[in-house]
Image (spheres, grey):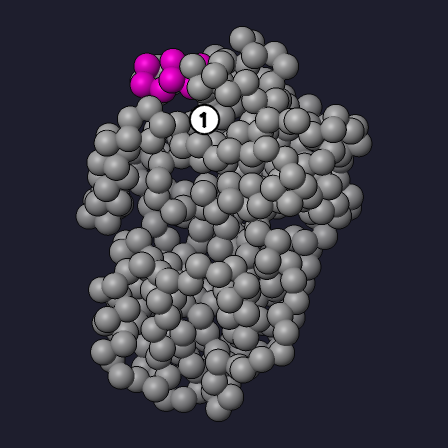
């Protein structure tokens, strides 16, 4: 039986884990033995918890500093000879021991750090396949390149970048950012969010307690044209705040574990207000749901936002007082031209992706089938 490992990073419920969960779900459906491991928690459980808390505090209280450090360390052109000695000192031996113990046939990396480590170790484990599964709309320079067997590219720009950096085109598959199969099913007709409202808007992005979601909620002034459902995740403070508003057009939703229920909410929504995380954006694109951005966390989300705006895949909301948030939403939904232009951009993006289902692509890698290339590209 093929042994498969999936490596996200840190225990925070971010896109790395959501994509890892999606891959794991596909693999388990085909009865493959599959294990998800965070190398940090595996090697340093207590330190990982402290590091996760420190990361959240850093981006919340010192976002500009984090952004500067991220751009300094992770952005810029990839250099083959570049070593990240601190990462190697902390994690390389632990990864080496883990691979020797588990003896995986295939490893999927949904974060740059395990990819970098496995790129360094590949010579010691030549029969092990390593697959990069990118979870943002750009690729930072920490990701391994040279000895990686396959790359799941999110957009054509990344495919072109990887080719320019020397990656064999045959190793690149334009999958988009993988989303859970639940979001690929059509929603059954059900109770709409609010029949009286012109549009029903989901708001998400506040589950970790960072970002500008409280400021956004305070700026909402619904008069009945727009109904809002706010996904609070496990953020109890946000849930209580929204609930205590006692506004008939603003509803707080607690943590939703069910993918089917989340898919139903997507199906009932006219659009979504969120942060530019790669996975959430990809889920919305899969549902062809207009995406409005209210805030971007420093680092990855800033980079995603720049790229998504250029491709007209998101609409950035202005938080200037001249035009309230609700008026910006209504302006979009009342404009046939804006809607048409947005739908064209989404269609173009979807057409660039491989027309093969992610399940078939995974099977091709597991069973050494050639011809994994992309349609429409």
By secondary structure, the bulk of the magenta-drawn segment is best described as: helix
Location of the C terminus (image quadrant) = top right
Residue 358 seen: yes
Location of the N terminus (image quadrant) = top right
Rendering coords of residue 338 (x, y %) = 58, 71
- Residue 268's quadrant in the figure? bottom right
Question: Was residue 326 drawn as part of the magenta stretch in this picture?
Answer: no
Q: Is residue 241 above or below residue 26?
A: below
Give the residues in magenta: 89-96
Question: Residue placed farthest to the top in the image?
Answer: 124
- Residue 360's quadrant in the figure? top right
Residue pictured at 29% horizontal, 26% vertical = 44
Within 10 Å of disc 1 (Cα), the crowding (few <14, some 14-19, many 20+) is: many
Residue 106 seen: no
Is 35 on the left-hand or right-hand side of 167?
A: left
Is 292 on the left-hand or right-hand side of 4?
A: left
Q: Which residue is mark 1?
A: 114
Residue pictured at 23% horizontal, 42% vertical = 53
Q: Is residue 328 above or below residue 77?
A: below
Rendering coords of residue 352 (x, y %) = 70, 48
Q: Is residue 95 above or below residue 330?
A: above
Q: Secondary structure at mark 1?
A: helix
Question: Was residue 92 drawn as part of the magenta stretch in this picture?
Answer: yes
**Total numbered labels placed on residues in the image:** 1
Seen from the viewer's position, the closer of residues 273 and 242 is 242
Residue pictured at 49% horizontal, 14% vertical = 100
Rendering coords of residue 183 (x, y %) = 59, 59
Seen from the viewer's position, the closer of residues 183 and 225 is 183
């Amino acid at each position: 039986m093929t042994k498969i490992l999936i490596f996200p990073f840190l225990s925070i419920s971010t896109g790395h884990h959501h994509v890892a969960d999606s891959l794991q779900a596909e693999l388990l459906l085909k009865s493959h033995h599959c294990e998800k491991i965070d190398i940090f928690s595996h090697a340093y459980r207590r330190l990982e918890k402290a590091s996760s808390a420190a990361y959240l505090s850093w981006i919340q209280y010192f976002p500009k500093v984090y952004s500067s450090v991220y751009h300094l360390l992770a952005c810029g052109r990839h250099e083959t000879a570049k070593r990240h000695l601190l990462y190697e000192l902390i994690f390389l031996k632990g990864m080496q021991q883990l691979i020797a113990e588990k003896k995986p046939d295939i490893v999927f990396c949904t974060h740059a750090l395990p990819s970098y480590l496995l790129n360094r170790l590949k010579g010691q484990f030549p029969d092990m396949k390593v697959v990069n599964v990118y979870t943002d709309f750009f690729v930072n320079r920490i990701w391994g390149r040279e000895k990686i067997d396959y790359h799941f590219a999110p957009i054509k720009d990344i495919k072109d970048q990887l080719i320019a950096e020397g990656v064999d085109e045959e190793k690149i598959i334009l999958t988009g950012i993988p989303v859970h199969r639940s979001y690929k099913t059509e929603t059954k007709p059900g109770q709409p969010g609010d029949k009286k409202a012109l549009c029903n808007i989901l708001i998400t992005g506040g589950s970790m307690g960072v970002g500008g979601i409280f400021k956004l909620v305070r700026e909402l002034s619904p008069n009945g044209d727009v109904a809002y459902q706010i996904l609070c995740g496990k953020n109890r403070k946000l849930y209580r705040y929204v609930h205590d508003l006692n506004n008939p057009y603003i509803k707080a939703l607690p943590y939703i574990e069910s993918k089917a229920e989340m898919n139903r909410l997507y199906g009932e929504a006219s659009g979504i207000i969120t942060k530019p995380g790669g996975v959430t954006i990809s889920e919305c694109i899969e549902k062809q749901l207009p995406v409005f951005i209210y805030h971007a966390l420093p680092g990855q989300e800033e980079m995603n936002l720049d790229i998504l705006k250029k491709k007209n895949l998101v609409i950035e909301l202005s938080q200037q007082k001249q035009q309230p948030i609700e008026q910006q939403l209504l302006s979009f939904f009342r404009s046939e031209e804006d809607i048409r232009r947005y739908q064209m951009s989404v269609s173009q993006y979807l057409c660039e992706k491989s027309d093969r289902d992610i399940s078939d692509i995974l099977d091709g890698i597991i069973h050494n089938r050639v011809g994994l290339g992309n349609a429409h590209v």
